Image (tube, coloured by chain):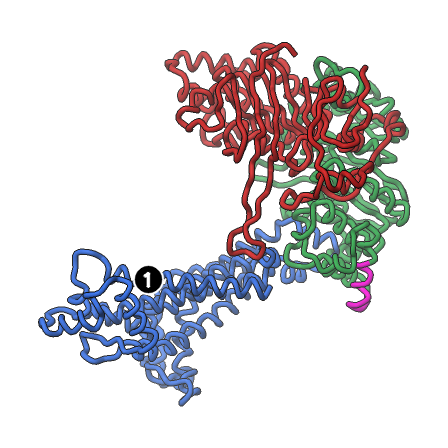
Amino acid sequence: MSKKILYEAKNVSKRFTVGSRFSAKGRLTVNAVDNVSITIHEGETLGLVGESGCGKSTLGRCMTRLYEISEGHLVFDGTDISRLSMRALRPLRAKLQMVFQDPSASLNPRRRIRDLIAEPLRIHSKLNEAQITKRVAELLELVGLLPDHATRFQHEFSGGQRQRIGIARAIALNPKLIVLDEPVSALDVSVQAQIVNLLADLQEKLGLTYAFIAHDLSVVRQVSTRIAVMYLGSIVELGNAEDIFSNPAHPYTQALISAVPVPDINKAGSRKRIVLSGDVPSPINPPSGCHFHPRCPVAQERCKIERPSLLTHSNNRTVACHFPIDVRRD
Amino acid sequence: MLLAILRRVGQMFFVMVGISMLVFMIFFATPGADPASRIAGRNASPEILEAVRKSFGFDQPFYVQYLIMMKKIFITGDLTSFVNRGWKVVPAVLDTIPVTLSLVIGAAILWVIFGIIIGTVAAATRGSWLDKLLMILGLIGISMPVYWLGEVMNLVTQSRYHDTWMFSWVPPLGYKNLSSDPKGWFLTLIIPWITLAILYIGLYGRVLRANLIEAMQEDYVRTARAKGLSETRILLRHALRTSLISFVTLFGLDFGALVGGSALLTEVVFDLHGVGKLTYDALQNLDLPVIMTTVMYASFFVVLANALVDVVYILLDPRVRSV
Amino acid sequence: MLSVRDLRVSFCTEQGMVQAIDGVSFDVAEGEILGVVGESGSGKTVSLLAVMGLITDPNAVIEGSIKYQGRELVGLSAKDMRKLRGREIAMIFQDPMTALTPVYTIGWQIAEQIRAHEKISAKAAEQRAIDLLQEVNIPNPAEAIHLYPHQLSGGMRQRAVIAMALSCNPSLLVADEPTTALDVTVQAQILDLVRKLQKNYKSAVVFITHDMGVIAEIADRVMVMYAGRIAERGSKRELFSEPQHPYTQALLDSIPPLEGKRPHRLKSIPGAPPALLHRSTGCAFAPRCAKRFDACVNMPILTANGHDAACFKVNPI
């Protein structure tokens, strides 16, 4: 990795309090994101995967300062943005965009597509009306929509097209980093692939960097350069996308990958499936020691007491496990 | 569950103390006017002003004034009206409470029963002529102003048709004491109950119907259908039970407001000397001690009714219990 | 056991008649798992709701024939249908978060179903509920029956829903995307559970999903639906190893692989599934199909050889 670091999250934690002082259990703290450090290099895609409650979406929102972080630092393009005021943050917002799962919820249904895409341009750029119109047409073409779509409303579009509009809005200001929060999860399978391809094309054409948050492992594998696997607010494994899938080092990663049903009957029989017992525990009251130990097939006494720290092993693989599965060099 | 209820009651007292302070501040701690002269009423002589100032402690700090006032209202009960000299305010308010409670509780029983029946029947027969008829009747009920309806009721039952077999049982206007004359109490209140309830029957019937129809679209109703339950059972045990939660919210607000004095028009029309009537008269005379006491009483009732609603919530909705 | 012939479901809307299901025929044999795949709007859920008699929309028109163990269900009285539902044919829904009534305990809700179909004491029904929860691997079932839905995790709720569906030992279980709302690791547990229960109870299962991977894991036979019609059907082996319909083929190709070399680009299907109102008279997939040719302006007919596809490439006129 010779490329320069574009984004760095250092020891980021995000705590939420739930319940009120007057409730039976009193105020409770949820460590939604617990001491997470990640770096994103220019031009790469960092995939964040995990099950519900693992904190991947919260981390994404912290990265774009939609949530205030409780602890840690966020460095974007050389600037520490973790404590910048909203006003000081504004010029940087143009360079740091976010795309959400449900595009129809983030697009005003009463405005034309043209105006929706032009909105960030009007706020952040000094373009005149003619230039804005030209830029909107350009953006529509970039995301694979037709020029005459500009005057329509979002309800006239299918889910995939709406996500294209959401992406057009996000790239309008030539951002450097886009945080994509489950961008294809709400779409039909046949449309998912279109959007995945579109994102790859745009990355190539515009030199974008992505943080790609998703629960669908096969999609994350397809798009990511590196992948961080999260469990209950912490990163349990981080490494190159293809390597992680061929040689998972953390028992959780291994189980997660093995649990994905594969649409290939020849492989379905030969694949070793590890079915974990129990559900993901509540982040309000996480298990002692390694958070994964109650469900872990290889847990030992030590795992109940001592929390493993993230250690970098061979092949650029970082794992938080006392007994990682052998990471081979291949 | 008991703990949740106790906690809610504790919260209620906390809010009540807060309200009493706020009411006190609004009436006496607002700058620019001499509270003594407000209490004393218009055209009070300097001696009376001085007496007021002494007895309410207006020459002392605010918190002392507040405590004196609270003592006068809640402990000694010797707060006196200065418009009608020597008239004790607290017993006067206490006297009116049974009247208002009798009126509102009776009407509430009527409107809850008929509101549920109408709402459920309309939802069950959605789209039919019966549903449409009930909803139109409900709308008419909501649209009729209570003072007009009351006067019409009086006209019909007290004069025009009073001598026919239908309404000869209706006693003259006014309130009869429940403990000394239970039959008279009941008979005098029947017409006021119906008059007050009609508006709310229409309102609650329509709201419940909408809630039920929404609930019938829920996934758990589909599950109930897939279980092979009868439509009646699904409507009553599954949809109605969950719809009652919002019904109760509405009820708490309306009931609290009515007991707190909103039943004024009904009280006036039927010559019932309730809290609303008392407040109205006090406002006419700017009788500050009376106004303050009834305002405090009214807000206490809204708080109490809301606390009761929350207790009912705890009974109705298991999700609230664990919070 | 279940035989659906030429099922048509249409809805009267303000914009005219909408044909949600357009001539669907299929059979379910005893003890088999039929997988039904399709995207949103493909009619996979609506067709099974029609079988269950659960389409309550007064504007819906259901035509065709649905025979359950020789008995015609279309036009059956509501009362007779009710006796069948929950007892003979049970259903599991997608979202376990909303599928249970929030104000009753799960034990109560399971007992309610048992008592709706059998004359049995409350005590005995409760015991059956405990046994059922045991069966679906809910820990401490004797205490779990007193829990309310919100006190259970998504996976546990789905187990409770499954226990409820099995309470009267149905011979046909319709599962509508039962794992879609769940996490992958929990999905694996539920799939294992469905398989185990299907063996123990010998029920036939119709498993509706949009996930080809889930189908590959669980189904014996597969039916692929597109725009209210069957695109392809056959045994799992046939369908996955030699998909005949271009849609099935494209659907399989568009899923990113979990192992091996990553393709530079995914093979995607252009466009989007057609909206209900804008269905053509020809092959509904033709506008998105890479293999379309002149004949595709007509409606292709589903072959009938066991492994069938509705495509002119497979079945030229």
Left or right side of B98 for A231: right
Inspect the magenta stretch and tell me whether residue C126 lies in it: yes
**Magenta residue span:** C119-130
The residue nearer to you, when weighing C238 against A179, is A179
Residue at coordinates 51% horizontally, 60% vertically from top-left?
A: B247
Residue at coordinates 11% horizontally, 71% vertically from top-left?
A: B44
Relative height, residue A193 to residue A288 (above, below): above
Residue at coordinates 40% horizontally, 20% vertically from top-left?
A: A122
Q: Quadrant of the C terminus of chain C?
A: top right
Outermost residue on the bottom side: it is: B180
Read off the chain for label 1: B
Counting from the top left corner in percent of width and height, residue A21 is at: 51, 53
Counting from the top left corner in percent of width and height, residue B178 is at: 41, 85
| CA neighbours of label 1 inside 10 A, class few (<14), some (14 to 19), many (20+) | some
Relative height, residue C177 to residue B147 (above, below): above
Question: Color of chain B here?
Answer: blue
Inspect the magenta stretch and tell me whether residue C316 lies in it: no
Counting from the top left corner in percent of width and height, residue B13 is at: 43, 65
Q: Using the rendered view, name the quadrant where residue A217 is placed.
A: top right
The residue nearer to you, when weighing A286 against C5, is A286
Left or right side of C258 for A36: left
